[in-house]
Image (tube, rainbow, N blue to C red):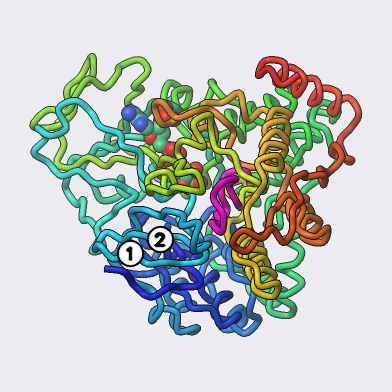
């Protein structure tokens, strides 16, 4: 069944898909959004587990494109809970009457480039095929759960829940014996709440994570006043940071060159404030192991303070990765939960999980009976949702094939050989290292600008050149190699999915730097892109020359250290 041709088909109705729809409408484009769920909200539609909440402050985690929208919405807490975030998504959708252009309960299964038409043929799971000039992958970075399975899981007679696909009506664990596998952010947020109602909770931990307290609560009235006085300035200030959120960075202090008492005072201040503020205290934390250890040791001390049993505290303390190289968790009462009589921690490194049984879980040394088991086992991040669709570009190559050695993109936005296909917060963009809402807005605005430019110049397609894609990917690799990120087996590296190629998938240069690069590329006449209509090439710029200089604010010895690491990385990967 072939449908009428669209200008733009958007995959996903989370925050990126909704805003993209709005921007397309502004240009009078014929647009439709395809969404697998029954409602809008993406991450906040699916992840309804108890305790789910945003780890960026609500005032920062808000759309900034419409002042009236900003002024009429009022968050109740510093870190909004999932139901409120979902209500916000619905509010945005209703306010701009978005739902009429969204097809719910529908999945995109394939998109094949039709060179003769300068368009994509997009296939849906209901058999419909929709021709569309542009396809926008607003599919989210953490939207496809890993295919994790355990021997014997089919024999288990209790109920299995996944944090990433939580039942809409909620779950009542009262009086139940519950097991939870995983200690990432989803588990760390849900464990304290499940522990309050369950008769007994057993946490199966393979790797401990760093977590800092949210100190959540109502947003202080003064903060609201300051924000309401000028939400534009507030948003602009956040977007001009590397993380896309206001974080009280102390830009030039080095932990290795600061007196221990001063460091302690600074870290205590940041700990008391809570959340991600501890990430930005010292510039050397992300690149110098010695500096990182100072902060990691401080957090280890905080874990010991909160957990009464020293053995449990030790098990909860990360030892295998530098602080910040996995996305740190922001919790409410996580560590103190282990002081409860009804909570126990099983270290899967010492006592590995062997199998599920009919009544629970068998580890090497123990057997457990559970009424319910929660899987908080993570996502096939960044590439999972894109690679699961059969996307075939100009030579019939799939994106999955193109990314066989890890994702390669130009600016995290486009892939060579896949014209008119845009990724929102894709691999190679700052995305998951930032406040997603601000990165989404920057990307959607930019894609809308590209589409407007193509239409104004009556062009049929735009494609990233392979040369520009290679230069950008090398730059991303080199930037990542300057940090400690690449030393950790994280989902950022693709390390949580067996067989997934290892490549640090986000751009570490920061949202502010990245935005400048994107704008320079556009201002220089779409550097790195080929723009054409049918056989006629209208614009050809194959080189990407707008690489920023090495970080200017980095102390010389750090820069040397970082550059040394880049040189070693390049040698190891045969790039010199
Ligand atoms: P994460 O952070 O990927 O956490 C997944 C957890 O599940 C992590 O502790 C894993 O341990 C554990 N895991 C995964 N597979 C297994 C198996 N087979 N056995 C035991 N344990 C396992 O996902 P989240 O959903 O918590 O958070 C994702 C992001 O969402 C988060 O970073 C925030 O940005 C929001 P491992 O570390 O692999 O040893």
At horizontal 64% and vertical 26% (from top left) the residue drawn is 297
566 in relation to 376, above or below: above
Judge left or right: residue 552 versus residue 112: right
Question: Do the numbered discs 2 and 1 sit on residues whose CB atoms are within 8 Å?
Answer: yes
Q: Secondary structure at mark 1?
A: strand
Q: Is residue 65 above or below residue 487?
A: below
The question of residue 425 being in magenta is answered with: yes
Q: Is residue 70 above or below residue 245?
A: below
Gap between marks 2 and 1 measured at Cα:
6 Å
The region drawn magenta spans 414-428
The answer to whether one can see residue 202 in this image is yes
Q: Is residue 381 visible?
A: no
**In the image shown, does 91 or 362 lie closer to the viewer?**
91
Q: Identify the residue under disc 2.
A: 121
Q: Which residue is drawn at the image coordinates 58% and 75% (left, top)?
A: 23
Residue sticking out furthest to the front: 535
Answer few, some or many: residues within 10 Å of disc 1's Cα (few below 14, many 20 plus, some between 14 and 19).
many
Mark found first going from the N terminus, 2 or 1:
2
The answer to whether residue 387 is above or below residue 64 is above
Ligand 1 rendered quadrant: top left
Relative side of 359 to 557, left or right = left
* Residue 473 x/y as whole percent: 66, 37
Question: In the rendered image, which residue does mark 1 sit on?
Answer: 129
Front in this rendered view, residue 496 or 535: 535
Quadrant for the C terminus, please.
Answer: top right
Q: Residue at x 34, y 41 (%)?
A: 376
Which quadrant of the rendered structure holds the N terminus? bottom left
Q: Position of residue 488 (x, y in %)?
A: 56, 26
The residue under the point 44% across, 27% down is 207
x and y percentages locating residue 384 in the rendered image? 42, 43
């Amino acid at each position: 069944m072939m449908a009428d041709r669209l200008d733009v088909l958007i995959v996903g109705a989370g925050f990126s898909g909704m805003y993209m729809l709005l921007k397309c409408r502004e240009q009078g484009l014929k647009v439709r959004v395809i969404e697998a769920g029954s409602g809008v909200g993406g991450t906040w539609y699916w992840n309804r587990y108890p305790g789910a909440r945003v780890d960026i402050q609500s005032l920062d985690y808000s759309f900034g494109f419409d002042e009236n929208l900003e002024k009429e919405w009022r968050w109740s807490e510093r870190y909004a809970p999932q139901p409120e975030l979902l209500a916000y998504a619905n509010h945005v959708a209703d306010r701009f009457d978005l739902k009429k252009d969204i097809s719910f309960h529908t999945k995109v299964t394939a998109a094949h480039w039709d060179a003769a038409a300068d368009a994509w043929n997009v296939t849906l799971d209901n058999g419909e095929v929709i021709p569309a000039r542009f396809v926008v992958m607003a599919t989210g970075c953490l939207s496809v759960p890993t295919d994790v399975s355990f021997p014997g899981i089919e024999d288990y007679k209790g109920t299995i829940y996944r944090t990433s696909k939580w039942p809409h009506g909620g779950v009542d664990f009262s009086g139940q014996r519950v097991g939870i596998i995983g200690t990432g952010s989803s588990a760390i947020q849900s464990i304290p709440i499940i522990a309050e109602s369950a008769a007994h909770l057993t946490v199966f931990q393979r790797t401990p994570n760093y977590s800092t307290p949210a100190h959540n609560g109502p947003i202080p009235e003064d903060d609201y006043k300051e924000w309401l006085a000028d939400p534009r300035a507030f948003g602009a200030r956040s977007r001009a940071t590397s993380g896309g959120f206001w974080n009280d960075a102390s830009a030039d202090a080095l932990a290795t060159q600061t007196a221990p008492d001063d460091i302690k005072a600074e870290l205590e201040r940041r700990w008391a404030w809570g959340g991600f503020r501890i990430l930005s205290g010292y510039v050397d934390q992300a690149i110098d192991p010695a500096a990182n250890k100072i902060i990691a040791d401080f957090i280890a001390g905080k874990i010991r303070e909160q957990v009464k049993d020293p053995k449990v505290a030790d098990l909860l303390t990360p030892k295998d990765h530098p602080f910040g190289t996995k996305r740190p968790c922001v919790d409410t009462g996580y560590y103190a939960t282990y002081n409860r009589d009804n909570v126990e921690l099983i270290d899967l490194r010492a006592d590995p999980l062997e199998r599920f049984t009919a009544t629970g879980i068998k580890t090497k040394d123990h057997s457990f009976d559970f009424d319910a088991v929660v899987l908080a086992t993570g996502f096939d991040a960044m590439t999972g949702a894109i690679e699961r669709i059969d996307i075939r570009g100009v030579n019939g190559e799939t994106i999955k094939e193109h990314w066989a050695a890890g994702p390669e993109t130009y600016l995290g936005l486009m892939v060579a050989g896949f014209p008119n296909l845009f990724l929102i917060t894709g691999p190679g963009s700052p995305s998951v290292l930032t406040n997603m809402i601000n990165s989404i807005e920057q990307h959607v605005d930019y894609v809308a600008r590209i589409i407007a430019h193509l239409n104004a110049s009556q062009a049929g397609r735009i494609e990233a050149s392979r040369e520009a894609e290679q230069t950008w990917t090398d730059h991303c690799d080199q930037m990542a190699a300057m940090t400690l990120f690449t030393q950790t087996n994280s989902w950022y590296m693709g390390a949580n999915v067996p067989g997934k190629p290892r490549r640090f998938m986000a751009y570490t240069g920061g949202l502010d730097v990245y935005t400048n690069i994107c704008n320079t590329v556009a201002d220089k006449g779409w550097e790195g892109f080929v723009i054409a209509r049918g056989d006629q090439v209208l614009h050809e710029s194959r080189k990407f020359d707008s690489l920023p200089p090495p970080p200017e604010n980095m102390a010389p010895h750090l820069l040397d250290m970082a550059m040394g690491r880049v040189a070693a990385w390049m040698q190891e990967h045969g790039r010199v």
